[in-house]
Amino acid sequence: MASLQEEAPTIPTKRKENGVDTWSDLWLKTTVTQPLKHGVTAVQAPSLSGGTVSPRTPSTATASEPATPTFTDAQTLISNPADIVDRTRLLNDEILLKVLSSSPDSQRKSNRLVCKRWLNVQGRLFGSLRILEWEFLESGRLAARFPDLTDVDLIHGCVVTPVGSSICLHHRFISAHLDSGVSAFSPSWRPCEDNLLPADVVDRGLRVLANGCPNLRRLAVLGASELGLISVAEECPTLQELELHRCNDNVLLGIAACSNLQILKLVGNVYGLYGSIVSDVGLTILAQGCRRLLKLDLTGCEGSFDGIKAIGHCCQMLEELTVCDHRMDDGWLAALPFCENLKTLRLMSCKRIDSVPGPDEYLGRCSALETLHLERCQLRDKNGVRALFKVCETVTEIVVQDCWGWDDEGFSLASTCRGVKLLYLEGCSLVTTEGLESVLLTWNEIEQLKIESCRKINDGEISPELSNLFCGLKELRWRPDSKSILAAGLMETGIGEKGRKFFSKS
C-alpha cells in the first residue's frame, strides 16, 4: 500500500471557457493523474492501537502540508481483509445463539447479514412461521433455514396465485388471488378450488416438513390427504394442535395416528370457496383415533346425533366444542349431554340451531357446562333456541354477539338457566329494556352485566327494581347506545350516590 505521507498534489487551476470555469475538465484531469487515496481525508479512520486519528480537512491544508492524515507504522490501514480475525468463531453455536437472542428485534434483521453462520444460527430463534411460497418448503430450504420450528402454517402456500391476477379475495381463513375471466361469474364457481395445489403435491411437502422439523407441535394445512397426515404423525410425535382445511372423511383416517393430539380444527365446506364433506363416518373415525382431545372446532361439517354421541363417548377429556356454520341433521343437540366434561360451547355463524330437537324427555343437560357463546347466529327459530337452553341449563356465563332474531321472546327462554353469573349482550338490537329486566330479575346469582350496542335498551326505561339489581353487581358495563348516560338517567334512583361501589364491588 502506498504511503499516505506523500506530498499533496498541486491543485490545478480552473480553466475558463468563454469566461466560465468548467469543473468537469478539472475533475477528469485530477482523477486521471492523481490516485483516489485522497478521498479518505474526510473520513475519521480508527486506529489499530486503540486511539482515533483526527483527519485534517482539505480546507485547512496548505501547499507544503499533505491533505491526508499521517499514520505511523502501528496505525496503517489493513490492506488485506483476509487478515481480519473473526473472534465469534471462538464461541460455539449455543453461546452465539444466546447472544443473538438477547439482541433487540430491530437489530435481528441486520444480524442475519453479517455472515452465513449468523444467518443459520439466528434461524433457530424462530419457532413459528407462515409459508407463502410452496417451493420454499418443498426444496428443503425451510428445514435447513429454520430447524427448530414448532408452529407452521401452510394454508396460504397451498393456494396458487394465477399469473397476472389483480383481484385479491380475503376471507377469515385464507387470502387468494383470482382470475377475472367470465367463468368467475357462474353460480357454481369456487375460486379457491380452481387454484389449490393437488393433494399429492401437498403430501410431498408434508413429508419434507416432517423429516426436517420433528419437534412440530402445531400444523395448519389445506387440501392434504390421509397419506400426508400419516407421515406427519409418524415423524412428529409431539404434534398437539392440527388445523385441516378442505377436510373430508377419508382425510380423517390419517388423524388416528396422531396419538397426542389435543386441539383439532376441521374445516369442511366453506360457501363460495371450496367444498368437502365431513359426515358421521368421519366424526366416528375422529372420535376413535383422538381420545385425548381437549378442544374441537367443527366448521362447515355435516353430521347428526350419532357423530356427536361418538365424540362424547370416546373423547372423554373434551372441554371445549365450537360449531361453526354447521350442516348437522335435526336432533343433534340431544347428543351434547354425552360430552360429560364439556365446559364451553360455542355456536358461530349458524343459520339454524336445531329445527327438530325432539321431545323434552330426550333432551338431557350438560352437567359440567359453564359457558355458552352465541355469535352471528340465526336465532329466529324459537324451538331450537328453547332446546339449546334446555341442554345448557347449568351455564354460568352467557355471551350473545350480533345474533339475528334475538328478541324478548327468545331472550326469555334463557330464564331457565338459574345459575347465570355473567351476561354479555352485544349487537342485540331487538332486545328491549323490559325484556332484559324480566330475565335479570329471575337470576339471583348475577354478578356481571355487559350491555353494548343494543339500541332498544334505554336509560330512561330502567325501573327501580332493575336499578337496585345494578347496585349489587360486581361489574357493570352499560353502553347500549352512543347516547347512553347512565348516571344522568338514574339520578332519581339514588345510584349516583353510590359512587365507585356502583361500578365495582370488592
Image (tube, rainbow, N blue to C red):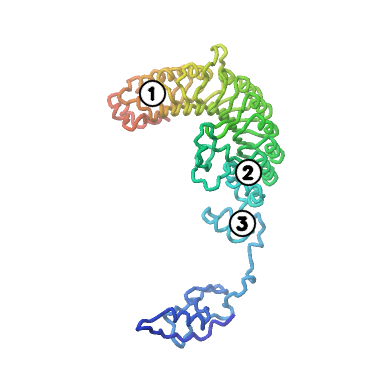
Q: Identify the residue shown where x is 42% and y is 85%.
A: 13
Pick whichever, 401 or 356, lies toward us. Answer: 356
- Left/right placement of residue 311 relative to residue 183 reads right
Q: Earlier in the sequence, mark 1 or mark 3?
A: 3
User: Where 437 falls versus 245 (above or below)?
Assistant: above
Please identify the quarter of the rendering in which residue 367 is found: top right
Residue matched to label 1 = 430
Q: Earlier in the sequence, mark 2 or mark 1?
A: 2
The quarter of the displayed image where residue 282 is located: top right
Residue 468 in picture, x, y percent from top left = 36, 22
For mark 2, give the secondary structure: loop
Q: Secondary structure at mark 3?
A: helix
Q: Secondary structure at mark 1?
A: loop
Is the Cβ of the residue at disc 1 closer than 8 Å to that at disc 3? no
Q: Which residue is mark 2?
A: 150
Which of the two marks, 2 or 1, is nearer to us in this view?
1
For badge 1, the amino acid type reads: Leu
The residue singled out by tag 3 in the image is: 119
**Residue type marked 2:** Thr
Image quadrant occupied by the C terminus: top left
> Does residue 199 lie above or below 351 as drawn?
below
Q: Which mark is residue 152?
A: none
Category of crowding for the residue at label 3, using alpha-carbon neighbours closer than 10 angstroms: few (below 14), some (14–19), many (at least 20): some
Q: Amino acid at mark 3?
A: Leu
- 322 w.r.t. 229: above or below: above
